[in-house]
Amino acid sequence: MFVYLVIGVVVWLQLLANWLPTYAEWRMIIAGAGWNGFVAGIVADLQQLAARFNLWWQGVMSANAARDDLVLVALAAALIWLMAGLTGWLTRRFGRVSLPASQFSGRSVLSCCTVLRAGGCSWLPWV
């Protein structure tokens, strides 16, 4: 789960801030340009992303947030990514992803999508 979180954060930041160096920048670093410019570039890109989120958050707190599509897409992507990870973990751990329990003719019935070798869903009654 930890590896999933780390990989997700790195990919998410790369998509939002484009902070990883390009092939030409890697060649300059290897040729002797030094790591200082590399680190400074990453820090500048991530600070610019943080400044956008901070500006948006200040607008939210003062009740006049500007519409920033990057923030909206970032929050939606993070939510979808976390829900996908939770669903995968539940499926791997328990073999099913449980839906909320409901009452069915006096008995508590839990609708579960059970991972079977043949596939498909089943109803599992829980008393």
Image (tube, helix red, strand yellow):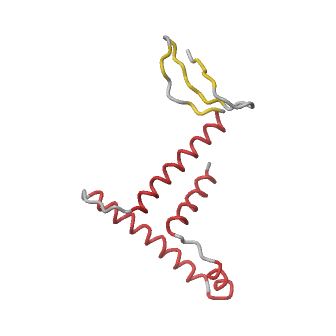
The spot of residue 114 in percent (x, y) is 65, 29
Q: Residue furthest bottom?
A: 32
Is the residue 99 above or below the residue 43 in the image?
A: above
The one of 4 and 107 positioned closer to us in this rendering: 107
At a point 61% along the width and 30% down the height, the residue shown is 113
Q: Residue at x 46, y 52 (%)?
A: 76
Query: Up-down: is 97 above or below 8?
Result: above
Residue plotted at (57% across, 79% down): 38
* Res. 28 image quadrant: bottom right
Q: Residue 115 placed where, x, y %? A: 68, 32
Residue drawn at (63%, 54%) of the image: 3
Q: Name the quarter where the C terminus is drawn.
A: top right
**Residue nearer the viewer, 111 or 13:** 111
Total labels: the figure holds 0
Q: Position of residue 61 (x, y in %)?
A: 28, 57
Quarter of the image holding residue 12?
A: bottom right
Figure check: 1 above or below 109: below
Is 7 left, or right, of 70 in this rendering?
right
Q: Residue furthest top?
A: 106
